[in-house]
Image: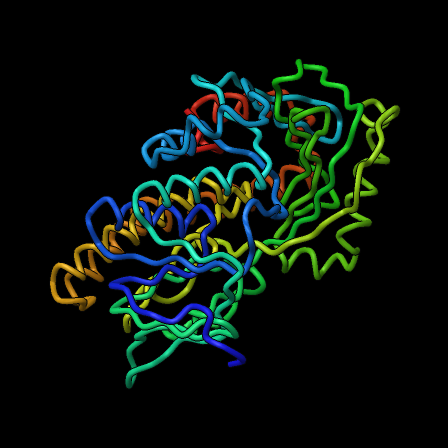
Amino acid sequence: MSRAAQKGDSDVLVIGAGPAGAAAATVLARAGVDVAVVDRARFPRDKVCGDAVSNGAMDLLDGLGAGDDVRAGPHAIVERGVAVFPNGARVGREYARPGYIVRRVDLDDAIKRAAERTGARVFEGTAVRELVMDGDRVCGARGPELDWSAKLVIAADGYGSVGLAAVGRDKPRGRALGVSSTAYVRGMTYPDGERTADHFFERDLPCGYAWIFPEVEGLANVGVYLREDTYRAAGIPLKQLLDNFIARHPERFGSAEMVGKVRTWSLPLAPAPGPSAGHGVILAGDAGGFIDPLSGEGIWQAPHTGRLAGQLATAAIGAGGELTAPLLRGFERACEESIWRPSRAKAVTQEVMRQVVRAGLYRLPPLIAALRWAYRRRSFEMTKA
């Protein structure tokens, strides 16, 4: 450690000030718990993402006190979603309430500021190198400019979290990991209107899809997503997959212009193997592997699991700082009901869609009718009303 710019203690230390960490900190601060948050970045900071915020996610942000700030910033409104198949067949539905497209530089800053307003102490530009252990129990964290003690730690630091080893989990890979590449594009066309989010199920994206989202300040978020095991089997670089998708759709990209670079990122998928809490640490958001395996959505899952982690930590602090067996069972049960069980069903749907595209079954009118029925019943989008 070169120097200890931030040295101290709190009841709870949250690692990561993104949507999961900020949500956890907000819950804790509202409950009167002394909570500190550290993040290696300085806000506002960008993050690679699809930028889609479902109406269910907006409900969570409203509950955290961040919704008004999000709506006041740059955004696009999403009124309908459409699944597009290789022959051009389109299956869509109108949302009961709008969703949003919000760049992460704006979204995450709004949620972080909401946590600060509740009384959470946030230290930016402060990286964590390792957790501090007292026997087999986490009791703080250290970094190049950090030396912090805490009764509990919430790890909301994304893929490859420092908290994984403490609960006996490895970094996700294969079927437990998604990969994606995205870019911003100017000059898109929208056949179903500019408030439409299109999801393309294509042959070279098994267990995944491509997307075109509505424009925010003239730029559309465009990308591809697929499961890592199918990506490795295909052997085509992510950037090439995105380039191929764009080349296949001149009707959408003919006069469009890419702005900036293609960026890639990893998505830890649910259901993740192993526990999500124990030994003084709680995993939240991407760190816990809570991302929807079918859609790659994580913005609803992050504040939701951050809130659950904050509630667990609040109860544990009230019980003397211990993650007791009953508290851990309750947390895992809540994760099972809201994340793990729906994600197992989504993984089955993902395999079905893979076969539908591979075998060309989307050409059959009865199959399209069945997909349209399922889509309108929210079978594919549980976080969107």
Q: Quadrant of residue 33?
A: bottom left
When the figure is inspected, residue 243 is found, relative to residue 145, above or below; the finding is above
Where residue 55 appears, as percent x and y from the top left, is 44, 27
Query: Is residue 78 visible in the rendered structure shown here?
Result: yes
Where residue 324 appears, as percent x and y from the top left, is 16, 67
Q: How is the image coloured?
A: rainbow
Of residue 323 and residue 179, the one placed in the foreground of this image is 323
In the displayed structure image, the side of residue 14 where residue 216 appears, left or right = right
Where residue 340 appears, as percent x and y from the top left, is 37, 51
Of residue 16 and residue 371, the one placed in the foreground of this image is 16
Residue located 34% across and 58% down the image: 36
Q: Quadrant of residue 78?
A: top right
Where residue 56 appears, as percent x and y from the top left, is 40, 30
Query: Is residue 348 visible in the rendered structure shown here?
Result: no
When the figure is inspected, residue 326 is found, relative to residue 180, above or below; the finding is below
In the displayed structure image, the side of residue 224 where residue 261 appears, left or right = right
Quadrant for the C terminus, please.
top left
In the displayed structure image, the side of residue 147 where residue 257 appears, left or right = right
In the displayed structure image, the side of residue 312 where residue 224 appears, left or right = right
When the figure is inspected, residue 63 is found, relative to residue 276, above or below; the finding is above
Residue located 79% across and 55% down the image: 236
Residue located 47% across and 37% down the image: 110
